[in-house]
Amino acid sequence: MYQLKLWLKRFVRYLDYASNYSALPSEKAVLETLPEANGIIDFLYKLAEYLTFNFYYASDGDLDFAKHPLVFARDKKGDCDDFALFALWVFRIKFPEAESYLATCFRDNEGHAVCIVMFGGNYYHISNWGMYGGFNTFEALAASIFPDWKRFYLLNYNFTILKTLQNKG
């Protein structure tokens, strides 16, 4: 069921992108605004700072979907999945060789989306909450989001579930 909801979010994201296409900034224009960095970890810290100072949190309301990164760049606002998808998009352009994903972590009825980057054998996550890491397991990463987490989904850029974890504790 969760994968079906994710597919619907992906579909709505592309409809939103297509309907806004002519008014969107170019990929090049967005990338030119990003900070320079020395390596992956430095870039993640600077990207988290960039997100904090250039975007603000705003709920999608009832129609919860992740905006296309260029729509998010134009709007300068979004919820956690918008921040996470934008961070993943930017990171994959800057460091295409690095391992990176989206993830959603849930406790009871509350969830949070993050961009995950693996570097040096550790996992780091970035979202509208900032940048955190290095964690050596997905369970440790999930606990850094919600200490009382229940479910964790590792996703690709198109919101396909790659891994599901349940916290029995």
Image (tube, helix red, strand yellow):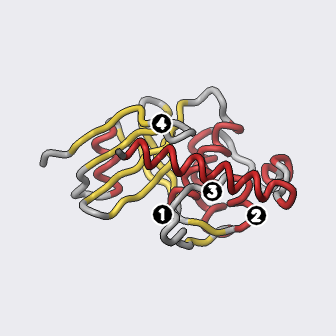
Q: Is residue 75 left or right of residue 67?
A: right
Query: Which residue, given by chain and number where applicable, does mark 3 sit on?
Result: 67
Residue occupying the far top of the picture: 97
The nearer-to-camera label among 4 and 1 is 4
Where residue 79 appears, x then y in whole percent?
A: 53, 65
Where residue 4 appears, x then y in whole percent?
A: 43, 44
Query: Tag 2: residue type?
Result: Arg
User: How dense is the environment of label 4, judged by Cα within 10 Å: few (below 14), some, or many (20 and up)?
Assistant: some
The quadrant of the picture occupied by the N terminus is: top left
Closest to the observer, 27 or 49: 27
Asked whether the viewer can see residue 46, the reply is: no
Q: Tell me the SS state at disc 3.
A: loop
User: How dense is the environment of label 3, judged by Cα within 10 Å: few (below 14), some, or many (20 and up)?
Assistant: many
User: How dense is the environment of label 2, judged by Cα within 10 Å: few (below 14), some, or many (20 and up)?
Assistant: some
Q: Tell me the SS state at disc 4.
A: loop
Which comes before the other along the chain, label 1 or label 3?
A: 3
The residue at the point 59 percent across, 44 percent down is 88
Query: Tag 4: residue type?
Result: Thr
Give the label on residue 74, or none. 2
Where residue 50 appears, x then y in whole percent?
A: 66, 61
Q: Tell me the SS state at disc 2.
A: helix
Which comes before the other along the chain, label 4 or label 3?
A: 3
Query: Which residue, given by chain and number where applicable, does mark 4 sit on?
Result: 160
Give the label on residue 129, or none. 1
Contact check, label 4 and label 3, Cβ < 8 Å: no
Whole-number angstrom distance, CA of label 4 to CA of label 2: 26 Å
Contact check, label 2 and label 1, Cβ < 8 Å: no
Q: Tell me the SS state at disc 1.
A: loop
Query: Tag 3: residue type?
Result: Lys
